[in-house]
Image (spheres, rainbow, N blue to C red):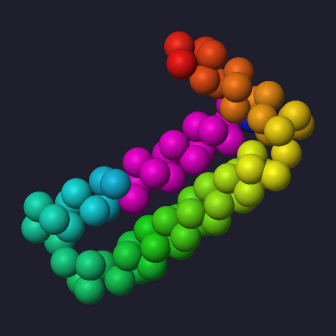
Amino acid sequence: MSGLFNFLWALCVGAVALFGFLVVMGAFSPGDVLWLTLIVAVLAVLFVIHQVRIARELHGHREDRMTREVQQIRERRGF
């Protein structure tokens, strides 16, 4: 289940980055597609809240489940 959530958060970041790239390249104006701008803004806020929550959990507790999961992810990536 954790892998699925990590994949969804990665998709969230990808969608925000793609939207930003397309806006910078001039594909469309954020005002022209207001509904899409609002969706991307909500995704960005949710991602920031998620990252703040993870940072607080990692900072406050040195030996818990979240720390072990992050350590396993880093070991899998080779850090």
Q: Residue 22: image x %, image y %?
A: 20, 60
- Location of residue 65 with respect to 59 vertically, above or below: above
Q: Residue 7: image x %, image y %?
A: 58, 37
- Residue sitting at 38 percent across and 76 percent down? 37
- Location of residue 60 with respect to 5 vertically, above or below: below
Asked if residue 32 lies in the magenta stretch, the reply is no
- Residue sitting at 57 percent across and 59 percent down? 47
Answer yes or no: is residue 50 visible.
no
- Residue sitting at 69 percent across and 32 percent down? 70
Instruction: Name, please, the residue furthest toward the left.
Output: 26
- Magenta part of the chain: 3-16
Residue 62 vs residue 15: left or right? right
Residue 73 vs residue 38: left or right? right
Name the image quarter holding residue 17.
bottom left
Instruction: Name, please, the residue furthest toward the right.
Output: 64
Q: Residue 1: image x %, image y %?
A: 78, 34
Disc count in the image? 0
- Location of residue 72 with respect to 29 vertically, above or below: above
Which is the main secondary structure of the residues drawn in magenta? helix
* Quarter that holds the C terminus: top right
- Residue sitting at 82 percent across and 52 percent down? 60
Q: Residue 41: image x %, image y %?
A: 46, 73
Between 52 and 16, the residue placed more toward the observer is: 52
Asked if residue 9 lies in the magenta stretch, the reply is yes
Between 74 and 17, the residue placed more toward the observer is: 74
Name the image quarter holding residue 46.
bottom right
Answer yes or no: is residue 47 visible.
yes
